[in-house]
Amino acid sequence: MKKYLISFLLLFVLTLSSSAQDADVEVFVIDSYITQVEPYNFILSFFTDDSVTSTVTIENQYSFVVSDTLAEDHQIEIDLSNMTLDSAYVKFIISGKTKNGVNYISDQFEVIAPFKNLLQSDKDPSLLTMCCFGGIIFGLPSPTVVFQNGETMFSLAKEISLFTHYSGGYNYPAGYFGIEYAHIFNTEHQNFLRFGYKQIFTLKHIEFVSAGVSGFTSFKGFNGVSTEITIGWLKIYNAFTLYSRYRYNFQPSNFDRNFHEISIGLYSHFFSLNL
């Protein structure tokens, strides 16, 4: 089991190192929304950790200069009436140059379009279809391999993000409180309920890395603590993120019951409440 843990931690460290080398300018979005009534305007304000110029590009087609001089605070209001949009999720990126003339580009952000007449109905699936498809994906459990005392078992788990909070961009929350139910096959304690907190760090090249701690119970006297590391690899339909996770579960009063887990799954904060 140690080689699995070492491999996972090595991947975690290498990912952080790669991200640190590429993180030149940090962009922190303050406001990002589209007005509810005509004319439909995109309101955007953000700040950067250094004085830079800035341009916002919407859907890789429409570019607008936000700040043509070096600044840390940036804001713009854009009329969307003449744009052709084919999704309710409007994507945009922020780019520009530093005071040294070096180009930078932000992560991709999203804003929800509250209007329907600007969307192309032939490209946008119906609301019912989207809800059904999203519900099916959301309900998929996470397959998990469990290692305990030299034995290997299989488990299915489902985590739901309950409460989120944001500090910078809107691609992912800064952290969330979640609840999880897991069923382990062919073992004495089969059913577990967990509640815990996960801190999310967004990175370049992948989606995010998160570290978390949870408390768990089997409702039959097996109570303990879980620590975990999760890597979010890629987004699916702008609503779900494919991730892999390593988790260590231990009971302070009985270390013979400790066990490890490696799992893959889909993360979404779509149904959570923002604190």
Image: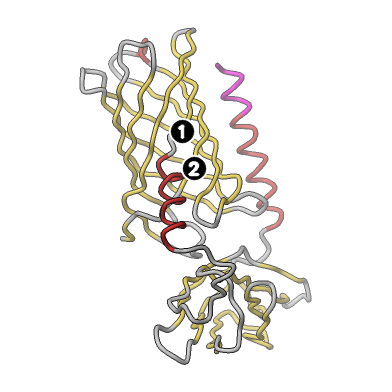
Provide the residue designation for mark 2.
266
* Frontmost residue, 30 versus 124: 124
Q: Position of residue 91 (x, y in %)?
A: 58, 69
Q: Position of residue 206 (x, y in %)?
A: 63, 49
Q: How is the image coloured?
A: secondary structure
Residue under the point 42% across and 18% down: 259
Q: Can residue 3 be found in the magenta stretch? A: yes
Say whether disc 1 or disc 2 marks the residue closer to the N-terminus.
Answer: 1
Position of 194 with respect to 242 (left or right) is left
* Frontmost residue, 129 versus 16: 129
Q: What amino acid is labelled 1 in the image?
A: Ser
**Which segment is the magenta one?**
1-7
Q: Is residue 75 above or below residue 140?
A: below
Q: What amino acid is labelled 2 in the image?
A: Leu
Provide the residue designation for mark 1.
142
Q: Is residue 146 above or below residue 136?
A: above
Q: Residues within 10 Å of mark 1 (few under 14, many from 20)?
A: some
Q: CA distance from mark 1 to mark 2?
A: 7 Å
Please, what secondary structure does the residue beneath circle 2 have?
strand
